[in-house]
Image: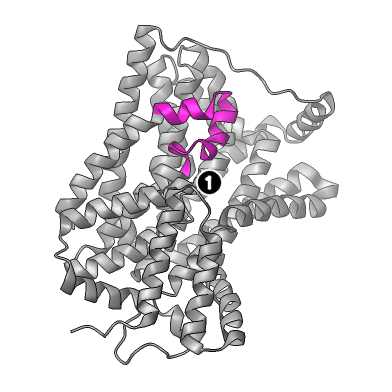
């Protein structure tokens, strides 16, 4: 028997439906979430002042939960920036240019390299990290720039970001909303991430080769962006500040340190926050070491500059996420922490209570659950973030799994994958701008070419998930 549903439960459910509708219209749901928090606080406390206080405290709660992820992403971006500025990134990817001899090799080598680097640096910095070096090589051997953009998108913003096995930003959000450990989501997502990735990239490559043979796509040269002579001189001065020997040293040291981190995670059983902290600490160490050797007299100011750039990026990405995450955290234990013990006796949180009630009303099963989570994830991705709505996917996975009786980790992972593949940078044109800009292609054309492969991948992945729930 579940707890009798109160007005709080129904209002929470109504706001979830409104948020889904707003995202479906490609609008930002942050305001709806803030209003939802305020209304829930008003109903729970019957106090205007406590509702206003609770609204702000819910932001603090969300920031505390997300702070580790925001910081590690900010520091990784700062480190990536100095790697690019000093030319170390060019040395890091240079050996791979020797592997690229044909369009087929170009597609798969760039894709796999993008995926691996994105696991550690996240996709947006990785696009800049490898795009500028490998794009000319790929175009020279006959792979159109749109093919390079597709490879970077599907492997980076698709496979790497939807799993996010190393930095664990995405699974942290969904796991918190679902009320399960981060590791459970990661383990459950492994087969789904790779099934989705293999199906999508193979279909995309088949369609790309077909159009190249038909002459629809032709070899093209990338147009360099206009850059002032002063900017070029400054960039060259910085790249020349390190000797070739030092660049080679760092090109070996950086991936080696991250490899040691991965080994340490397995050996020391570091998970979640500890794993994130290890990556963040290593990135900070690399940033400082390279800055000291590159800037010498100006090192103190330059390190601060890079950190500021990184933090600006981190909070720009997660700014829309905070109010949305704050709303969905209220579905679990955060409600009591913020508004006090106002839920009925025996309540296990708003989402749990709704899930138990749903189990007695709707005959949910694994098929309906998997299809619904894919649809919810895809809808939440329509805002072009990929991250702003995955808390909703985790929350609904919790609700459905309670009704079904199993499969919470699989459903959570499925919602996460759908949201990020759609909104994280493979289908929504305004989320494709980094890769499109680097490759000098139209983001709308890139989205159009990604559409069928991603839809096929989501369909196959959803069917597989039905058997895993």
- The residue positioned 32% from the left and 31% from the top of the image is 453
343 left or right of 430 in image: left
Q: Position of residue 143 (x, y in %)?
A: 45, 16
Quarter the N terminus occupies: bottom left
In the rendered image, residue 259 lying in the magenta stretch gets the answer no
Mark 1: few, some, or many residues within 10 Å (few <14, many ≥20)? many
Q: Nearer the viewer, residue 115 or 219?
A: 219
Residue 226's quadrant in the figure?
top right
Specify whether residue 269 is in view: no
Q: Position of residue 254 (x, y in %)?
A: 56, 44
Q: Nearer the viewer, residue 330 or 30?
A: 30
Of residues 118 and 422, the one nearer the viewer is 422
Quarter of the image with the C terminus is bottom left
Residue 35 left/right relative to 342: right
Q: Residue at x 34, y 57 (%)?
A: 186
Q: Main secondary structure of the magenta part?
A: helix
Would residue 426 be counted in the magenta stretch?
yes
The colour scheme used to paint the residues is: one colour
* Residue 253 % position (x, y): 56, 43
Secondary element at image label 1:
helix
How many numbered marks appear? 1
Q: Is residue 468 above or below residue 94?
A: below
Q: Residue at label 1?
A: 121
Residue 233 in picture, x, y percent from top left: 82, 27
Please give the range of residues in magenta: 424-449
Q: Residue at x 84, y 48 (%)?
A: 298
- Compared with residue 348, is residue 304 higher up or lower down, i.e. above or below? above
Observer able to see residue 211: yes
Residue at 25% over, 48% down: 191
């Amino acid at each position: 028997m579940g707890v009798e549903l109160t007005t709080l439960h129904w209002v929470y459910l109504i706001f979830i439906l409104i948020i889904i509708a707003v995202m479906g219209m490609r609008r930002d749901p942050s305001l709806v979430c803030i209003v939802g928090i305020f209304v829930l606080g008003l109903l729970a406390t019957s106090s205007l002042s406590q509702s206003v206080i609770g609204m702000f405290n819910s932001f603090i709660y969300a920031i505390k939960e997300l702070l580790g992820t925001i910081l590690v992403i900010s520091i990784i971006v700062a480190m990536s920036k100095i790697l690019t500025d000093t030319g170390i990134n060019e040395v890091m990817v240079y050996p791979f240019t020797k592997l690229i001899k044909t369009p087929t090799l170009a597609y798969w080598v760039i894709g796999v390299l993008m995926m691996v680097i994105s696991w550690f640096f996240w996709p947006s910095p990785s696009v800049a990290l490898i795009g500028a070096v490998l794009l000319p090589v790929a175009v020279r051997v006959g792979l159109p720039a749109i093919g390079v953009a597709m490879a970077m998108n599907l492997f980076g913003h698709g496979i790497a970001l939807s799993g996010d096995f190393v930095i664990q930003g995405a699974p942290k959000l969904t796991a918190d909303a679902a009320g399960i450990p981060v590791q459970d989501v990661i383990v459950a997502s492994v087969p789904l991430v790779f099934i989705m990735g293999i199906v999508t990239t193979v279909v995309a490559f088949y369609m790309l080769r077909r159009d190249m043979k038909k002459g629809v796509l032709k070899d093209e040269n990338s147009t360099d962006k206009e850059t002032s002579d002063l900017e070029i001189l400054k960039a060259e001065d910085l790249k020349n500040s390190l000797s070739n020997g030092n660049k080679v040293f760092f090109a070996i040291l950086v991936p080696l340190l991250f490899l040691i981190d991965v080994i340490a995670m397995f050996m020391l059983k570091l998970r979640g926050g500890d794993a994130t902290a290890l990556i963040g600490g290593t990135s900070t160490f690399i940033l400082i070491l390279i800055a000291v050797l590159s800037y010498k007299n100006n090192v103190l100011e330059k390190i601060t500059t890079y950190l500021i750039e990184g933090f600006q990026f981190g909070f720009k990405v997660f700014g829309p996420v905070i109010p949305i995450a704050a709303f969905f955290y209220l579905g679990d234990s955060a409600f009591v922490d913020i508004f006090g013990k106002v839920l009925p006796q025996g309540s296990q949180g708003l989402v749990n209570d709704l899930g138990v009630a749903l189990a007695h009303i709707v005959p949910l099963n694994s098929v309906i659950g998997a299809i619904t989570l894919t649809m919810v994830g895809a809808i939440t991705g329509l805002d072009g973030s990929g991250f702003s709505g995955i808390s909703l996917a985790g929350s609904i996975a919790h609700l459905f799994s309670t009704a079904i009786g199993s499969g919470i980790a699989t459903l959570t992972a499925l919602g996460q994958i759908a949201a990020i593949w759609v909104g994280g940078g493979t289908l929504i044109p305004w989320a494709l701008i980094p890769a499109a800009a680097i490759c000098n292609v139209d983001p709308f054309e890139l989205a159009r070419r990604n559409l069928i492969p991603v839809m096929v991948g989501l369909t196959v992945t959803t069917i597989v998930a039905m058997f895993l729930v």
